[in-house]
């Protein structure tokens, strides 16, 4: 045995070697090892030296109002947007929070090496936050989760992560989901934040899509005890300016925002509209009074309870409707149109062709008026109008929609317009004529397939608010429990505003409130 002193090729220690690793092919290839290492069998790769733990940004969060966005590593901020956020935070009395995330981009124009870069723009240092924090009993900020910025669906998998509580995930793509929850529990939402940094992606397919969906924006979070309100702010990609409710923010200050272009409301169902939602929308200091929208858009205005085809064959529902005086079709049609006349005074009101509005047409086609004497006169008058309008057009047979017919007959001088089938409605550059029950090429409509029709859209129908790429979906204006719902529900009371800038934001109404308490100083300035 050779007993010379050398460095062990396995443990690296200098000691007297009394054994050889005989796995080499020749004497010169033998590896000198000590007795201890020889007994361990095949050499193991040396463990890398321990890395320094990432910096922890976990200051106390004790405010009642926050502006929350995110930032990519090794990427400059959008200076105009950051300055505007700082102005808005001061004006709102909010705390600015920036969730850091990582992205490895070897083609970045700002850095050649991002393999291990754990650095963010220095001007963001006071605002960075990368730990998990419960903001109140029903909302969790997931600052410790870094989701790949090119993820096509960044909220997938987060439904159960925070249990019954809603959560906020830092991500540059804006996405919003409502999660089904038992009716006894506080509504649960998942939302991303948008980003304050510039677009910095690879030139791959994933990178190009990530850059396209990069949302220069943030979310406003307002806390009131166990309640919270969340809405989106979408900044101008050039200047960084944005509008939030009735205020327009720039790097130089805050000014009164011009009237909003439009307000698309959650499905109305006039006969069953929730009084608290109605008050939050149209009452004093409500959404309409605050934002002054030029156009009001109504989905499922007519509930159609008197002519609901799903009630056919159920004698007990028929008995309930009879005893409750809910069988007069004319009264329900007139009530729906009067609902718009009263609330849309001085504004343009547009009624979108919807599946519940179409209940009236289905009733006219399927009912034998001889067996329904209480509605016979209204039926015959409606059927006669449809018969007079029937003709052969370029695409085949066509005739008027009965609900549209009655809107035109009863609207008087009010600025009420009922959209015909396949008639468009643009508010800014957003298509607002799609109810959501009909999808592309005859398929069933969903937020996902309608968000990809080649432009921005706002839809309704499912009573579940959401944001998916270019599509926004409103909720409902009814109570969250109706006769045809059971089990956990993702329904929420939610509208969507289109600001004068063309940017959109969902406005959720929870327990009759649509925003946090306005500070006294701001109320005085108004």
Image (cartoon, rainbow, N blue to C red):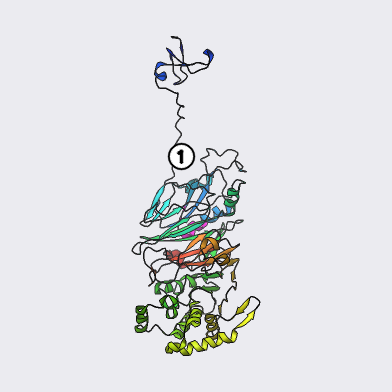
- From what the image shows, is residue 392 above or below residue 204? below
Measured from the top left, where is residue 214 in percent x and y? 56, 53
Residue 254 seen: no
Q: Residue at x 55, y 73 (%)?
A: 295
Tell me, yes or no, whether the highlighted magenta stretch contains residue 88.
yes
Q: Where's the N terminus, which quadrant?
A: top left
The 10 Å Cα crowd at callout 1, few under 14, some 14 to 19, many 20 or more, is few
Question: Secondary structure of the magenta portion, mostly?
Answer: helix
Rendered residue at 37%/57% (across/down): 138
Specify whether 23 is left or right of 320. Answer: right
Q: Which residue is mark 1?
A: 54
Dot 1 falls on a residue whose secondary structure is loop
Along the viewing direction, whichever of 363 and 512 lies nearer the viewer? 363
Q: Position of residue 84 (x, y in %)?
A: 54, 56
Furthest-right residue in view? Answer: 394
Whether residue 20 is visible: yes
Residue 69 rendering spot, x and y as whole percentages = 50, 53
Question: Horizontal and vertical percent for residue 495?
Answer: 48, 68
Q: Nearer the viewer, residue 229 or 92?
A: 229
* Magenta part of the chain: 87-96
Q: Is residue 348 magenta?
A: no
């Amino acid at each position: 045995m050779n007993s010379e002193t050398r460095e062990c090729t396995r443990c690296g220690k200098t000691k007297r070697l009394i054994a050889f690793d005989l796995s080499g092919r020749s004497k010169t290839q033998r590896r000198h090892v000590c007795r201890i290492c020889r007994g361990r069998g095949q050499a193991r790769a040396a463990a890398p030296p321990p890395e320094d733990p990432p910096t922890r940004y976990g200051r106390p969060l004790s405010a009642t109002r926050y502006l929350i966005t995110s930032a990519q590593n090794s990427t400059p901020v959008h200076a105009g947007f950051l300055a505007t956020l700082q102005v808005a935070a001061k004006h709102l009395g909010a705390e600015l929070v920036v969730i850091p995330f990582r992205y490895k981009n070897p083609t970045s124009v700002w850095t050649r090496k991002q393999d291990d870069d754990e650095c963010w723009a220095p001007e963001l240092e006071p605002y960075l936050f990368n730990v998990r924090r419960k903001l109140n009993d029903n909302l969790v900020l997931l600052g410790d989760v870094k989701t790949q910025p090119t993820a096509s669906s960044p909220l997938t998998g987060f439904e159960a992560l925070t249990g019954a509580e809603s959560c906020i995930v830092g991500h540059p793509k804006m996405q919003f989901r409502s999660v089904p929850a038992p009716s006894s529990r506080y509504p649960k939402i998942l939302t991303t934040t948008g980003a304050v940094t510039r677009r910095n992606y690879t030139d791959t397919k994933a990178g190009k899509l990530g850059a396209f969906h990069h949302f220069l924006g943030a979310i406003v979070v307002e806390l009131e005890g166990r309640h919270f309100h969340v809405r989106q702010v979408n900044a101008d990609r050039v200047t960084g300016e944005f509008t939030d409710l009735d205020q327009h923010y720039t790097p130089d200050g805050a000014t009164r925002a011009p009237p909003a272009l439009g307000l698309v409301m959650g499905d109305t169902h006039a006969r069953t509209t929730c009084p608290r939602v109605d008050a939050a929308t149209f009452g004093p200091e409500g959404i309409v009074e605050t934002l002054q929208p030029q156009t009001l858009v109504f989905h499922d205005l007519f509930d159609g309870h008197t002519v609901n085809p799903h009630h056919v064959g159920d004698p007990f529902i028929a008995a309930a409707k009879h005893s409750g005086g809910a069988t007069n079709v004319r009264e329900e049609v007139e009530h729906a149109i009067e609902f718009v006349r009263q609330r849309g005074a001085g504004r343009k009101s547009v009624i979108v062709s919807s599946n519940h509005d179409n209940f009236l047409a289905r009733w006219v086609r399927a009912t034998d008026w001889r067996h329904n004497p209480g509605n016979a006169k209204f039926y015959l008058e409606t059927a006669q109008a449809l018969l007079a309008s029937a003709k052969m057009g370029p695409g085949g047979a066509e005739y008027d929609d009965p609900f549209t017919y009655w809107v035109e007959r009863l609207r008087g001088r009010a600025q009420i317009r009922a959209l015909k089938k396949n008639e468009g409605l643009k508010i800014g550059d957003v298509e607002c004529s799609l109810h959501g029950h009909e999808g592309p090429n005859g398929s069933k409509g969903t937020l996902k397939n309608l968000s990809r029709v080649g432009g921005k859209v706002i839809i309704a129908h499912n009573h579940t608010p959401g944001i998916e790429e270019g599509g926004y979906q409103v909720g409902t204006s009814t109570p969250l429990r109706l006769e045809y719902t059971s089990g956990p529900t993702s329904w929420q009371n939610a509208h969507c505003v289109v600001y004068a800038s063309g940017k959109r934001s969902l406005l959720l109404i929870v327990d009759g409130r649509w925003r946090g308490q306005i500070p006294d100083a701001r109320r005085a300035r108004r």
